[in-house]
Image (tube, helix red, strand yellow):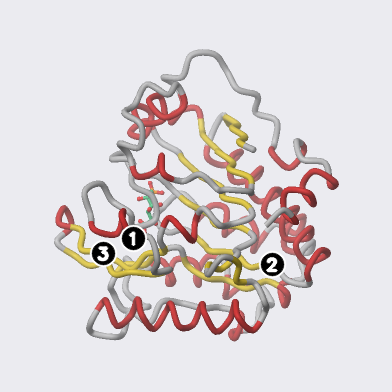
Amino acid sequence: MKDLSIYSDPGTLADSAAATFCALANNAITNHGKFVVALSGGRTPKALYELLATDERYRESVSWKDVYFFFGDERHVLPDHPDSNFRMANEALFKKIPVPASNIFRVPTELADASDAANRYQQALLAFFASNSEIEDDLPVFDLILLGMGPDGHTASLFPETAALDEKVKWVVANWVAKFASWRITITFPVINHARAVAFLVTGRDKAPIIKKIVNGSGDLLHYPVQRVDPHKGHKIWFLDQDASYLLNGKTTAEPFQNKISSSESNAAISQV
Ligand code: 6PG
């Protein structure tokens, strides 16, 4: 099932995304005792993380001890580096909620070799998902994977014309990104497409041309990495602000997503995988 909602501004988008995050979290905790989420990096999700941590409508509505945090991707920098996705999430969210440190799985980017970091991270995922019997078809089953999108149509650290796009077996790989002359560590499309829910948070006018191509279907099929995200059994949810969607013809309701899934429907979607 695909759902797309447009919000007047990033703050309204973050509020709806926070409500959806909490709805999915409570469904997962009710259904199987925990909520396993992969966070996205970059700038956009910071407002969501801060809202989850500081707005009591959200902070008080989730049993954080039952939430397990992973990262969809990471820059190959130390965890206290300004570019670190872990550092952003730690400052915006982890430090402000009662989540056990053992529930947070960051990418070990202190390892000098990015491939070592990716392999070590994959081992951590394997151990966690195996111990929780949440491996199906040789892939981990996340309850939610948060994703952003760059103006080039990348998502996570799956950039156009990079080797990671074609990985079919590994869960986590190191990916050389020539445009940044740097290594990234990223989960792969098989993992993303095995999630119970995937949510894109996309803001900013620079994203509008790609959004138009993707939503109106005018882009080359699978030309952009983001077009390869297609959860086999789960929800795919788009949260767009007006700036990112101003080139779309017609309007899509800005009704918050979590109001669109009845508990039975969300349970059905979540329990499908
Ligand atoms: C990263 C992200 C990346 C991000 C997009 C959008 O590590 O940078 O995972 O995929 O989501 O680049 O970034 P913004 O939200 O900053 O526009």
Identity of the amino acid at label 1?
Answer: Glu
Q: Which mark is residue 35?
A: 2
From the top left corner, tell me how far across and down residue 173 is, in percent.
33, 69
Q: Residue at x 60, y 64 (%)?
A: 141
Q: Is mark 3 within 8 Å of ligand 1?
A: no
Left or right: where 229 falls relative to 255: left
Q: What residue would you read off at disc 1?
A: 167
Of callouts 3 and 2, the N-terminal one? 2
Answer with the quarter of the image where residue 98 lies: bottom right
Identity of the amino acid at label 2?
Answer: Phe
Callout 3 crowding tier (Cα within 10 Å): few <14, some 14–19, many ≥20: many
Q: Is mark 2 within 8 Å of ligand 1?
A: no
Q: Residue furthest front?
A: 137
Q: Nearer the viewer, residue 229 or 6?
A: 229
CA distance for labels 1 and 2: 26 Å
Of callouts 1 and 3, the N-terminal one? 1
Identity of the amino acid at label 3?
Answer: Asn
Q: Is residue 39 above or below residue 13?
A: below
CA distance for labels 1 and 3: 10 Å
CA distance for labels 3 and 2: 28 Å
Quadrant (top left, top right, bottom left, bottom right) of the C terminus: bottom right
Answer with the quarter of the image where residue 244 lies: top left
Q: What residue would you read off at disc 3?
A: 175
Callout 1 crowding tier (Cα within 10 Å): few <14, some 14–19, many ≥20: some
